[in-house]
Image (cartoon, grey):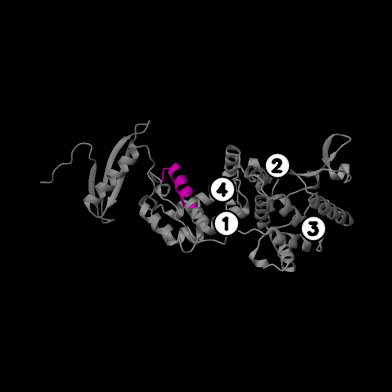
C-alpha cells in the first residue's frame, strides 16, 4: 500500500504526457482566496521533490522564482540594454564589444543560478595571458554589474562574481615621458608646423592638460588679466596686450561635457610659449572665420576627433626624428609631470596642476615619471650637527 504523504508535503504524481514526475504544494492564498500553488518537475521523484523544495524556499525568502533557463548571456544583455543609461554611444559600444568578445563566449551558456566562484576564477585566469590588467578589470566589472542587476530583479540569490579577485594580466605598453632634450626638439619642430598643432602640442606639454580637455577648449575660456578693470577677461574681449594669461579647464569632450573629476576643473596660468602659440593660432583662424568658438577645430569649424589629433601629432614627432608610432598625445601629459618632477616641483603642486583628487593618484598613475628626492631629513641633520 502506497504511504500517504504528510500534511503540507504537497502532491506528487506522474505526468504521462511529459514523462516526468510533478511535485506541487500550496504555499498560501491570494487576497481573493485563490490558492497559490508552486510546481516542479523531474525525471525522478527525488529530483522533482528537491526542485520543489528549492522553489518553496525561494518563495518563503521573498525571492521571485527565476526561470530555470535564465543564463549569463541573458543577464549581460539585460545590463547592456538597461544599465548604461547616460553613457556615450562610444562607451556603450566598447562595453558591448568586450562582452561579446570575452564574457558571453566563455560563460554565456552557463545558467546564472549555477554560476560559481570557480567558474569565474577559471575564466579570469584563462584571460591573463591575453588581456592587460585594466582589461581584466573591465570584463570582471561587466559580469559583476550584470549579476548585480540580476540580483535586484531576483534572478539569482547572490553575486559570486563579487567574491572573485582580478588577477594580474599581461603587461601593457609602458607609459613614457620625453626627456628635456626630446621635449625641446618636439617644441622646435612644432614651431615650424601649422599653428593648430603647434598650439596643441605646446599646451599639452607645458600645462599638462588632458587631450579630451584641450579638444573641448573654447576661446571664451582663454583669458587675460586686464589691469585696468582688475579682472580676468576673455582675450577676444580684452585683447592680447597684457602680462598674464590663463585658461579655464572646465570642460571636456566626455558625455555632458564634464571633466573627468570635480578636481579636474581648474584654472591654469599660461607660460609665455603657450600665449605665443595661441595668439598665432587665433590670428590664423581670423583669416578663415567659423561660427564655432572651439580653439582646436577643423577647417570646417567642427571639433577635432582623437584620430585627427593622433595623426597630426605623429607627423610632428616624425619630423623631430622620434619613433612616432611609439608615442601618443596623452604622453605629453606624462612628460609634463616628468619635467616638473625633475625640476624639483613638489608632488602636491604637480597633483593640483594635473587635476588629480590627491597625490596618491599622481603617484600611482605617474609612478615612473615621479622621481622625488627627499632632502628634508638631510637638511635637518646638517642643521642639528652644524655640518
Q: Is residue 357 magenta?
A: no
Task: Read off the residue under disc 3.
Answer: 196
- Please provide percent x and percent y for residue 183: 72, 59
Compare marks 1 and 3 and give the one earlier in the sequence. 1
Q: Nearer the viewer, residue 375 or 252?
A: 375
Q: Say if mark 3 contacts mark 4, CB within 8 Å.
A: no
Q: Which residues are magenta?
A: 142-155
Q: CA distance from mark 1 to mark 3?
A: 30 Å
> What element does badge 2 sit on?
strand
Viewer-side label of 1, 2: 2
145 in the magenta segment: yes
User: In what quadrant of the picture does the C terminus appear?
Assistant: top right
Q: Which mark is residue 266?
A: 2
Please give left or right for residue 319 compared with residue 138 in the image: right
Q: Which sits earlier in the primary sequence, circle 1 or circle 2?
A: 1
Residue in view at x 89 percent, y 57 percent: 287
Amino acid at each position: 500500500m502506497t504511504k500517504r504523504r504528510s500534511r503540507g508535503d504537497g502532491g506528487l504524481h506522474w505526468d504521462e504526457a511529459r514523462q516526468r514526475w510533478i511535485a506541487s504544494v500550496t504555499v498560501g492564498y491570494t487576497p481573493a482566496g485563490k490558492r497559490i500553488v508552486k510546481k516542479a518537475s523531474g525525471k525522478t521523484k527525488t529530483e522533482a521533490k528537491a526542485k520543489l523544495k528549492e522553489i518553496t524556499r525561494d518563495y518563503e525568502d521573498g525571492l521571485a522564482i527565476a526561470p530555470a533557463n535564465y543564463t549569463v548571456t541573458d543577464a549581460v544583455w539585460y545590463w547592456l540594454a538597461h544599465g548604461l543609461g547616460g553613457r556615450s554611444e562610444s562607451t556603450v559600444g566598447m562595453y558591448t564589444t568586450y562582452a561579446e568578445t570575452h564574457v558571453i563566449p566563455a560563460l554565456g551558456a552557463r545558467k546564472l543560478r549555477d554560476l560559481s566562484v570557480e567558474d569565474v576564477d577559471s575564466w579570469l585566469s584563462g584571460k591573463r595571458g591575453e588581456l592587460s590588467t585594466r582589461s581584466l578589470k573591465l570584463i570582471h566589472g561587466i559580469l559583476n554589474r550584470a549579476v548585480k542587476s540580476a540580483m535586484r530583479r531576483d534572478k539569482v540569490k547572490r553575486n559570486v562574481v563579487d567574491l572573485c579577485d582580478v588577477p594580474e594580466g599581461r603587461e601593457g605598453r609602458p607609459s613614457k615621458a620625453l626627456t628635456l632634450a626630446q621635449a625641446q626638439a618636439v617644441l622646435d619642430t612644432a614651431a615650424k608646423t601649422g599653428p593648430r598643432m603647434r598650439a596643441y602640442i605646446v599646451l599639452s606639454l607645458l600645462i599638462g592638460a588632458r587631450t579630451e580637455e584641450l579638444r573641448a577648449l573654447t576661446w571664451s575660456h582663454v583669458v587675460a588679466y586686464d589691469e585696468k578693470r582688475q579682472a580676468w577677461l576673455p582675450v577676444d574681449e580684452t585683447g592680447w596686450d597684457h602680462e598674464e594669461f590663463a585658461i579655464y579647464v572646465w570642460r571636456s569632450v566626455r558625455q555632458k561635457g564634464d571633466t573627468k573629476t570635480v578636481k579636474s576643473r581648474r584654472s591654469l596660468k599660461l607660460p609665455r610659449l603657450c600665449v605665443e602659440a595661441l595668439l598665432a593660432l587665433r590670428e590664423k583662424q581670423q583669416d578663415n572665420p567659423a561660427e564655432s568658438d572651439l580653439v582646436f577645430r577643423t577647417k570646417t569649424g567642427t571639433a577635432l576627433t582623437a584620430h585627427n589629433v593622433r595623426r597630426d601629432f605623429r607627423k610632428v614627432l616624425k619630423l623631430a626624428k622620434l619613433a612616432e608610432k611609439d608615442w601618443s598625445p596623452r604622453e605629453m601629459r606624462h612628460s609634463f609631470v616628468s619635467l616638473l618632477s625633475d625640476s624639483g616641483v613638489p608632488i602636491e603642486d604637480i597633483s593640483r596642476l594635473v587635476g588629480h583628487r590627491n597625490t596618491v593618484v599622481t603617484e600611482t598613475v605617474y609612478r615612473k615619471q615621479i622621481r622625488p628626492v627627499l632632502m628634508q631629513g638631510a637638511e635637518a641633520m646638517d642643521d642639528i650637527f652644524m655640518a
